[in-house]
């Protein structure tokens, strides 16, 4: 996501907001991403990432189980798993 922003003059893919939103699975059609963050622009042609990984405990068929959000003040992104893994919350902010 950061490299995408660098390549696009600071713009992030549409659908990333200040509130955490589940990322749409890359295995579904874009029309099935309503209410989810559609990050298909970073998986096209494998330029940034080959596919969006799926969290094993995901609950939405169209979702990847990971959440994404941005901080409009610091311009930092956070990606996190919806559910703890072995009691630990998995989250990364950059």
Image: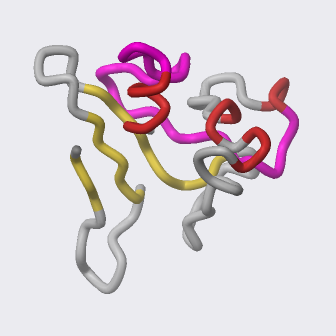
Q: Quadrant of the C terminus?
A: top left
The region drawn magenta spans 8-29
Identity of the residue drawn at 41% across and 56% down: 82
Identity of the residue drawn at 82% across and 51% down: 27
Q: Which of 22/41 is in front?
A: 41
Judge whether 10 appears above or below 81 on screen: above
Residue furthest out toward the bottom: 86
Residue furthest out toward the left: 74
Main SS of residues in magenta: loop
The quarter of the displayed image where residue 69 is located: top left
Q: Which of 89/38 is in front?
A: 38
Judge whether 56 appears above or below 19 on screen: below
Residue 6 % position (x, y):
39, 27
Q: Which of 42/89 is in front?
A: 42
In this rendering, would 59 be left or right of 29? left
Q: Quadrant of the N terminus?
A: top left
Identity of the residue drawn at 56% across and 41% down: 23
Judge whether 57 appears above or below 65 on screen: below
Residue 66 % position (x, y):
48, 52
In this rendering, would 50 be left or right of 74? right
The quarter of the displayed image where residue 5 is located: top left
């Amino acid at each position: 996501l950061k490299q995408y922003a660098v390549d696009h003059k600071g713009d992030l893919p549409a659908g990333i907001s200040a509130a955490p939103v589940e990322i749409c699975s890359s295995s579904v059609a874009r029309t099935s991403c309503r209410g989810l963050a559609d990050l298909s622009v970073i998986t096209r042609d494998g330029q940034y990432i080959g596919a969006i990984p799926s969290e094993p405990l995901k609950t939405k068929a169209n979702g990847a189980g990971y959440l994404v959000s941005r901080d409009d003040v610091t311009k930092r992104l956070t990606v996190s798993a919806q559910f703890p893994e072995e009691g630990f919350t998995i989250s990364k902010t950059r």
